[in-house]
Amino acid sequence: MAETAAGTAGPGLLVEPAALAVGLATALQRAGVGVPPERAGRFAAALRVVPPDHREPLYWAARITLVSQRSDLPVFDAVFSALFDGMLDPADSRGDTAAPPAVGSEPRDTKSAQPGSRPTEGQAPEGGSAASDGTGEGDDDSPARESVLAVASDLERLSHTSFADLDPEEVALMRQLVRRIVLSTPVRSTRRTHASQRSGERLDMRRTLRGAQRSAGDPVRLVHRRRRDRPRRLVLLCDVSGSMEPYTRVFLSLLQGAVAGARAEAFVFSTKLTRLTRQMAVRDPDQALAQAAATAPDWAGGTRLADSLARFVDDYGRRGMARGSVVVILSDGWAQDDPDSVAAQMARLARLAFRIIWVNPRKAAAGFAPLVGGMAAALPYCHGFVSGHSLAALEEVAAAIRSATRTATSTAQQPRTSASSTRSSTTTSPARPAGGS
């Protein structure tokens, strides 16, 4: 037994800790458990620091130091029992599911599973028979594990569920998850420069000559200047018309997270354009939503896409907000404007912005085609076209925003839809819901 085999360094020691560690590690390796030499050394050091007087301390010292994977626990228990309890070699019954469990492999409670806890005298190393009668009532891990799995399954289901199919409780949870999405834009080189020890775009003559005065006029160290890099501005334009109402609450949470994390500019539009950057900067999501609804009086109304884009370009875009920026438009494209007017305003915006990402939640529907007038007219000027109808789809939106490519659907590849053709395509598009834009 362990009382005689694994003694301390004092009197009565029959086996050295190092020899015991090597022997147990060799037996585990023969049984199929990989034990590196450093783990055997830790086991020997543990025996010198805390000499085991009973089987239980020896079991826990060996288990904590020699086992690194949960799948190796049954083999370790069998090897330990074979060596110290007089059982058969575990390699003979390895893989036999009908074989009786080895000593030390019984179910145990949470407290005894922690490395820092030691079982008291007379208590079984795995939790004792009084705590578990085979019915599973004494297993403290089961309820926690089931609850964690239940939460994980709910998140897995919600991540692919359309925002329009969520109930109020799920919408509240989804808004919290959406606010955690990190939106980052590609970097651009500014006109400002900074000193650099590495070779840059040009030599900093002033700093180089100033440093040469310390070395008798000899410019030993050359100082270069490099342009500073900074992330591009992010601008989000969210459609809050009646047709977008099932997605508005979640999209506004995305705007709130972008304003707080990426210092984005947030706008909403229906019949007119409203800037909500200051309202979206509030930490409380409910308060931000209430302020946004109070600021935009045309909430859940019609859609004036061309007028809203024209006001954004005239009042904000040409003044610098849209120059070199990544502009994200969240809309289904169901507009009351003339398609030629929408195309003209999108062309103006495309000349200013670095990238235009269009997020249309209707894109995820089966058999979707961009046939409505506003969507068909705007698509040739977009650099990205994604759905964003679910949490998983918003990850595609974040990836499109991060992309540094500026390739768009050119007018040569997809001719700009004329007014007559877009009007005819609008008549063949699905009927808009009641109260929609």
Image (cartoon, rainbow, N blue to C red):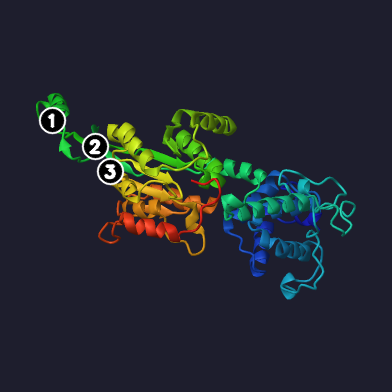
Callout in the foreground (2, 1): 2
Q: Which residue is mark 3?
A: 348
How far across and how far down the image is residue 316, in percent? 33, 33
Secondary structure of the residue carrying numbered label 1 = helix
Q: Nearer the viewer, mark 3 or mark 1?
A: 3
Question: Residue visible at 75% across and 71% down?
Answer: 89
Residue 170 in view: yes
Q: Position of residue 146 (x, y in %)?
A: 74, 53
When asked about the image quadrant of residue 221, the answer is top left
Of the 4 image quadrants, the one containing the N terminus is bottom right
Residue 371 in sight from this viewpoint: no
CA distance for labels 2 and 3: 29 Å
Residue 227, numbered label = 2
User: Where does residue 175 sit, x and y in percent of width and height?
Assistant: 58, 42
| Residue 311 vs residue 288, the one in the foreground | 311
Question: Nearer the observer, disc 2 or disc 3?
Answer: 3
Check whether the beta carbons of the residues at disc 3 and disc 1 lie within 8 A of each other.
Answer: no
Q: Residue at x 51, y 63 (%)?
A: 366
SS label for mark 3: helix
Q: Is residue 356 left or right of residue 1?
A: left
* Mark 3 vs 1, N-terminal side: 1
Residue sitting nearer the eye, 60 or 146: 146
10 Å neighbourhood of mark 3: few (<14), some, or many (≥20)?
Answer: some
Q: Residue furthest left?
A: 217
Percent position (x, y) of residue 66?
A: 65, 56
Disc 2 secondary structure class? strand
Whether residue 217 is situated above or below residue 181 in the rendered picture: above
Pointer 1 residue: 205
